[in-house]
Amino acid sequence: MDVVIQLADSSIRLATPLLLACLAGLYSERAGIFDIGLEGKMLAAAFTAAAVAAVTSSAWVGLIAGVMASVAFSLIHALASITLKGNQLISGVAINFLASGLTVLIGQNWFGQGGQTPQLSPDSRFLGIDLPLAETLGNIPGLGPIYQFVISDHNLIVYVAFAAVPLTWWILYRTRFGLRLRAVGENPGAVDTAGISVTSQRYAAVLICGVLCGISGAYLSTAMSAGFVRDMTAGKGFIALAALIFAKWRPWPALGACLLFGFLEALGIRYQEIDLGTLVIPVQFMQALPYILTVVILAGFVGKAVPPKAGGRPYVKER
Amino acid sequence: MNPQLPKWADLVLIPALNLLLAFLAAGLVVIFIGEDPVEAVHWLVVGALGSSYGLGFTFYYATTFIFTGLAVSIAFQAGLLNIGGEGQAAIGGIGVTLVCLALPWPHWTLALPFAILGAGLFGAAWAIIPGYLQAKRGSHIVITTIMFNFIASALVVYLLVNVLKVPGSMAPETRNFAPGTNLPFMHEMLGAIGITMTPTPMNFSAILAFLAAFGTWVLIWRTRLGYELRAFGHSEPAAVYGGIDPVRITVITMVISGAMAGMMALNVVMGFQHRLVLDFVGGAGFVGIAVALMGRSHPVGVVLAAILFGILYQGGAELAFEMPDISRDMIVVIQALVILFTGALENLVRAPVTRMFGRVRPRTT
């Protein structure tokens, strides 16, 4: 039972950055802007948040700075792919490398610790919050420990990430903004004909993506760990992208996909290999599983993942 | 490519201006961290080209980048963006390793053809699945090749840790290959004809890389297959209308592209390290994207761009030694800026230049 609770707890912790980045990608891609630069934006935010938090001793100032860094990278992506009608995929590749190089270069220049930021003290981090009555209810056998350890005792960003799922659903499917956002991703010509600016709609989507990636990055360096280390996103941005495809660009399935991939990661951290008697599953297989599952889904062997129709193509009036 | 511009402007002026912007931005980064960009360029050039030692390393790196750059540009010509060079190269390394470890090869000239075959087949095998899925099932090749990079990396770790590792050793690397498989180093070959050169990792593969570039040129511009490939890249509906099978051409393109990426292992694994080491690709697959973009996907451009990146890699290492505040990560930054300015932000330059030439058709926008 303890093992199950610990696994559930760490699945949630590990799923949080994936979920934020996945929803970030959802806004951008539903608006027709492919984003393979989630990883880079998270990394830039993780570094900036940790660096600023270390200097100011405030997690909140760090978070804001991290979000701003991520938004700055988003603006580059928007400039390249919306205003200049460039290749969105190449822009994403460039952003990933720019973040990977700049964070370590500047980090080494500022702190001289091989690209790391100084260790953050507890008061400049986001720490776990005890939900009401966690201690008391924890004594109830069965559900009590689940409340105390799985639902309670996470930091604020975790709750924000999970709250972002219904919020995203509501924005996307119940507001005028969401309808237009989905429309520019499917048929920008129709939106343009209705007299709504495709450009500003897409810019808005890409900026939201930047904000969410920023929170995700700040979570990595100021909540999940105490400081930034070189390339600390370690492919999380791409797992988030995989989760987005796995979820077929929808918010609730995105939650499921991120929890599944978070669980796989938690398993991989806990067990070096899983022994099923005749079959031993190595940890590398579990690390690769999110990617393998995504390829299978993309190939349409188990339910076809169809991306937004206008995705990846810049909108040009009057071809 | 662009009928509205004279050829020289399209092929020389715009890439040069893009590159200039990229290096200006890189200069700004150097100023931002409080160093002198002119001094940095000085150490970079001296470090890369100032000695036979520097030159050897520069061309060793360039050899790798020619292979990965050609891989990306062949796919580009067919309108496919192959981001999977990193994974294809890693799997190609497994191919080379299996060939080199399989037999006690008496001489490298015997081992080399099989190693080329191994590198090519394994690299191609890793590219053929995304190619097939794109052509047959419509899965986006960029996403599948990214996923295959991660799968390849997990697979190589698994093989090195569990299967190929030297028993009893902790290091995730294979045993050394038989000396008979080692490709001759450039300093050995030059030494044989009386020219002295400081020992560097530059090896026989450099010659193979130039042959590969020439072969690519012949393939793309002088064969029927190359014509089909370019036609497909230019306009898929037109190519299909002209009787070109889209599935066939996509799969063949990815096979050639993947094989080319795999060949980089000849240089690094068979030519220099003489065993398979974890992470031997080290981002070269991604450098290939920058090289292909900068070289406008033409073999001549790719060779020149690969040499430039060789200079950056070798010069960057020397630079980090002379000016410790500019670490080797500066190379990654420059690589990113080159991709950004020559790829994604290309219209920043192209639009004004096109306007300058005043041949734009009047538009209603």
Image: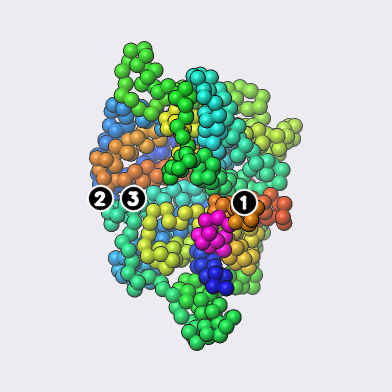
Does residue B172 appear in this view?
Answer: yes
Q: Chain of mark 2?
A: B
* Residue at x 62%, y 45% (from the top left corner): B141
Do the CB atoms of the residues marked 1 and 2 lie less than 8 Å apart?
no
| Pointer 3 residue | A105
Marks 1, 2 in one chain: no
- Which mark lies nearer to you, 3 or 1? 1
Q: How busy is the neighbourhood of tag 1: few (under 14 within 10 Å), some, or many (20 plus)? A: some
**Does the rendering let one see residue A254?**
no
Q: Which residue is mark 1?
A: A292
- Residue ID for mark 2: B34
CA gap, disc 3 and disc 2 = 12 Å
Up-down: is B137 above or below A113?
A: above
Left or right, B288 with respect to B191, comes to right
How far from the left and from the top, in percent, is residue A133? 49, 86
**Magenta region:** A262-274
Q: Quadrant of residue B331?
A: top left
Q: Amino acid at mark 1?
A: Ile
Tag shown at residue B112: none
